[in-house]
Image (cartoon, coloured by chain):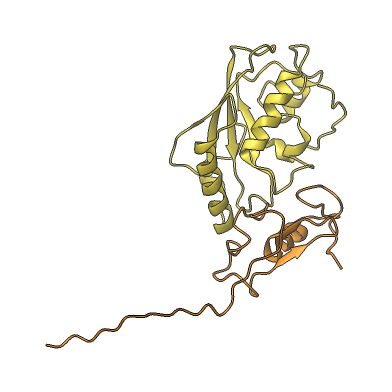
Chain colours: A yellow, B orange
Amino acid sequence: MTSPSASSRKALSKIATNRLQKELMEWQVNPPAGFKHKVTDNLQRWIIEVNGAPGTLYANEVFQLQVDFPEHYPMEAPQVVFIPPAPLHPHIYSNGHICLDILYDSWSPAMTVSSVCISIVSMLSSSTSKQRPADDERYVKNCRNGRSPKETRWWFHDDKV
Amino acid sequence: MQFWWTYKTEWHAVASWTWDAHDETCGICRMAFDGCCTDCKLPGDDCPLIWGACNHAFHLHCILKWVNSQTSQAHCPMCRREWQFKE
């Protein structure tokens, strides 16, 4: 619901395929702590299991991230969403969309799935309250019809949480 | 039937080269600097490295794809400074 179906997406370019194969190999040797890539034959959509870090509000909780790669990855950011139920967090909407600048305006092609995962777990770990964003209901209603979070115009105002 | 063979006793290196970059791989395509970007077949003059004013190096083809994909000012993928080619 949160992303176009696999068939409607454009196939990965040669550069994207090559880079993702490298990232996958590096991931297998050295995965980010607390993350597990669910093995499939689909290079364009990664499903990643996230374990809340010990000693944080999300300890012992397990979530799933869905990462979809555009044709021109890494020139374009991947689409990263939690598959509901998403963690209760002031920057994570109940439909799984994540308000995190590096996934949108601040993306850089030097970032990797692994570095994105580390940013997400650090965002979870620094949270001091388990609550939804104030505009959750309005935002989620706006995203019906499967709108991608990459089409949202985000305002990033709080870098403390 | 006859077989002809010889031993090759000497080997002359004509030249060897390497790019003078601080990293070993391009931060964009993740291919080795001694190799070429994903779109090229041969390293060397056909797939040169290029430096930014910030001293970060990339395959020319890779950084051009990034710069051209940005609607406003592009930033260095490594340090986020405004991307300028080193003079």
Q: Position of residue A79 (x, y in %)?
A: 65, 39
Q: Position of residue B15 (x, y in %)?
A: 59, 77
Q: In this image, B15 relative to A107: left or right?
A: left
The image quarter containing residue B21 is bottom right
Q: Position of residue A5 (x, y in %)?
A: 54, 40
Can you say whether B60 is above or below A150 in the image? Answer: below
Residue at (63% x, 53% y) in the render: A72
The image quarter containing residue A30 is top right
Q: In this image, A101 relative to B38: left or right?
A: right
Residue A144 shows up from this direction: no
Residue at (55% x, 30% y) in the render: A48
The image quarter containing residue B86 is bottom right
Q: Residue furthest left?
A: B1
Can you say whether A26 is above or below A38 in the image? Answer: below
* Quarter of the figure that contains the C terminus of chain A: top right
B28 or B5: nearer the eye? B5
Residue at (69% x, 28% y) in the render: A120
Q: In this image, A81 relative to B69: left or right?
A: left
Q: In this image, B78 relative to A2: left or right?
A: right
